Amino acid sequence: MTNKYTIPIAIKNEIDHVRAKFPSNENKPAIIESLLILQHHNDGFVTDSIMRSLAEYLSVSEIDVLEVATFYTMINTEPVGRNVISICNNVSCMLRGSDDILKHVEKKLCVKVGQSTTDKKFFLKDEIECLAACNGAPMMQINHKNYENLTLDEVDDILDKIK
Amino acid sequence: MKIYINNIEYDANPDETIIQVADRNNIKIPRFCYHKHLSVVASCRMCLVEIEGVKFAQPACSTPIKEDMRISTKSSKTKEAQKSTMEFLLINHPLDCPICDQAGECELQDVSLKHGDDHSKYLEFKRVVVDKDISPLISTEMTRCIHCSRCVRFGEEVAGNKELGLINRGEFTEIRAFIEDGVSSELSGNMIDLCPVGALNNKLYSYKARTWDLKQHPIISPHDCIGSNIFYHVYNNEIVRAIPKENSDINQTWLSDRDRFGYQGIYSKDRCYVSKHRKNKTLERVDSQDIIKKVNNAINSSLDKNTSSKIGSFISAQSTSEEMFLFQNLLRKLGIKNIDHRTNERDFDYQDTYPLMPSLGCNINDLSEYDNIILIGVNIKTEYPILTVRLNESVKQDTKIYSYHYFNMDEDFPVEKKFVMNNTDLLSLFQEHTLESCRNKKNLLVIGPNITYFSNQSVFLQALDKFAKNINSQIGYLTDFCNSTSGWILGNVPHRTIGGVKLDNPGLNATEMLENDLSTLIFYNLDPENDFHNSSALINSLQKSECNIFFTSYLTPIIEKYADYIVPISTYAESDGSFINIEGRFQSFNKVITPNSNVIDGWRALNELNILNNHQAYTIESIRSELSSTLSKIDFTSKILIDKKKYELDKSTKVHKNSLRHIYSTDQIVRRAKSLNETIQANNKSVYVSRDIFDDSENKKILKVVENNRVFKIDNFQIRDDLPSRTIVYSSSFNNKFTESKSTFVSLKK
């Protein structure tokens, strides 16, 4: 069995803040945001012991937490790369060539979509829906920052500059 | 309100859904995810029906009715919708019915035959899901799962312990537990019944028989005093599985795992199949025709040699009412008064003022009518799992539950407040304690079996009586065996005879019989290793007595060592019988399987002895008519103890040594149920010690405890900070084997 994870007090305060938004007898709605907070402090993914500690802290069952964590793509249950690349593939971007960009990035980083590079530098995220930047299609988002009107050369430039 | 289904008018209540009205009127609507005891999710879409004026077919399970609604369950639109849903559900379902245990009773199979199409448009690969080993009781075939989520909702809503969940989404959705073998609920077996396909299966029944070859026999649970109704399924004279028999007054449609899998104990290797008699210090096989005569001669020669007061007799409270009736009938006619069924108890001072019998004092269905239920020394989750369902229902209807115990244990329903204290502290608390929230409310105080194991039971009961009066509460009892009620009513106690009639010259109680060097001891259906509070006193008296007669279904080392006569008797399922449950409900059942030809029906053996002594001969019908005439005179509403004796409160500091009733070692049958004893709960066998005792002890590896001038060593213990002060708790009676007294005060040697 994995070691017990103790939630640091600073994170507990953040979770308490989330919990306060919901009725006092309902803790389940707080799971999703709490997981995001915990993930942020743990290199972008949550482990079984983190989920177990959260379940204990929120007095919900462990499986409730696992259900949420596996349902949403923004929560990762496996280790991922430091820099998260999201390439939009919805209609506007697709019409402006996002498929080529995705293929190019896959080839450049030697990963398939949904995988991380072996040096854990990049994580090419799966199941990306519209990122609300259709005016700048094709676009991608790296670590919550948008890059728009992309060409293949620009993509190379952007990726090379990231540490 | 009136609605029309298939153009026929039906009455309905405004808060009902279509499927509820249809079910009440026997109109068949196919369904997978809907279950009358679970919440509605409308996820399977199988119950789609056409409603006049609505463009698309609507799910019957979640659509509330409206005045003059016109529903059609047979129209072409309904049929088309159901056929399409069926095609979707079968896309990923494997066609492995020939090797599936569910085949023949499978809802998917039935519905697909009636509502599905004979071909599918889907030609691609089917989904495959890896199986999980979720529990020693449930086997899985997750590829067959259709994601109806009944098992998930059962855990969350009925059992109060959500262990299975739906993880991932879309094509990758699957049912699993957080950790692989994560299903440990005491009610987990119900998920097997709920599963409409063959995804969750009964592990014990795996590939044993086909469902259409089984014979179904009703029986009553012998494992707790609730008396759940069960159907045993028999194949070639062997019980292969158990399913609940619906009884809305007791177990509804549920069964605890103990009741479902406990039958395995009948097929234990310890079963006793031959009659034996000790000759020249060795046990010799005797013909089963002769053993009753030999036993009769032994009892009568003992009566000739000594007085009847030198004969002691013990009967298990797990025996059937018929056996209990004949047992005391035989012995009392022979003039033997030393009869007792309370082999687990120590203190008997209370017995003269005790009610006629222990009783819950209300019907199980009425539990939700109480404002407050106060549990004393009982853990419902492990001791009466089926009541968890009822208490969960009660809490939803605003009942508050309080718990007083010497050990902090989890419950699967919300507990308003837990009081964890040791014996002495609890006693002083009850003297003055009033629960503020109980004032002017309807209260029920439930006394659990752990209280009856206390060495100061009488003082405790008196204090509880006072507490009950303080908070104006009714008193109810829960007993440790399934038929303790019969033990009391049918006169298997030394001071009262059948019907609770008081005796002027009472016999010896269970403890006195072990201390008074009797010459003959008779044991009926008892396991000497585990069913006595004091095994060493028992061994001592077995050594001293001249003749030990065991009527038993199992051979144990003590029986083999000390028995002079062994009569192999039937277990509950191998003979006709009856149990009286804690509400006072008399439930009879018939023989389910025929035992080995050498095994004698318990009641027949006793009847035979009656005949040999020229007493009246009985048939099962004549016993039952006697029993029902006795029961008709009894008032089952519970009474408060009236005790005029004054007890002194003993407040000197001592060590409190208690044991917990372990879920799968409560009676001799369930102790031998192999699969149940492989579960996580069963393996929780250890000794818990409070921090202060550990700090006081010199040797930190082995604690020494002195009791009745004998020193007991406790190694391999765990320190628990949530234990009340000066407390040692044995988590299982197995661990307590041969230690003196299961529950007592002892002094600690430094």
Image (tube, coloured by chain):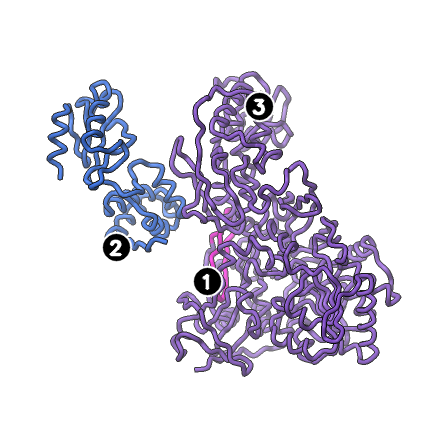
Chain colours: A blue, B purple
- Residue A126 spot, x, y in % from top left: 28, 32
B651 relative position to B552: left or right: left
Same chain, marks 2 and 1? no
Q: Quadrant of residue A117?
A: top left
User: Quick one: label 1, few (<14), some, or many (20+) residues within 10 Å?
Assistant: some
Q: How many marks?
A: 3
Asked whether the beta carbons under mark 3 and mark 1 sit within 8 Å of each other, the answer is no
Q: Secondary structure at mark 1?
A: loop
Identify the chain of the residue marked 3, using the numbered disc in the image.
Answer: B
Q: Does B341 sit above or below residue A54? A: below
Q: Secondary structure at mark 3?
A: helix
Q: Does B401 sit above or below residue B527? A: above
Q: CA distance from mark 2 to mark 3?
A: 57 Å
Q: Quadrant of residue B556?
A: bottom right
Q: Quadrant of residue B192?
A: top right
Q: CA distance from mark 2 to mark 1?
A: 27 Å
At label 3, the amino acid type is His
Q: Which mark is residue B408?
A: 1
Q: Which mark is residue B115?
A: 3
At label 1, the amino acid type is Asn
The question of residue B637 being in magenta is answered with no
User: Quick one: label 3, few (<14), some, or many (20+) residues within 10 Å?
Assistant: some
Same chain, marks 2 and 3? no
Q: CA distance from mark 3 to mark 1?
A: 52 Å
**If the image is split into quadrants, where does the N terminus of chain B sit?**
top right
At label 2, the amino acid type is Ile
- Residue B314 spot, x, y in % from top left: 70, 69
Q: Which mark is residue A9?
A: 2
Front one among B572 and B75: B572
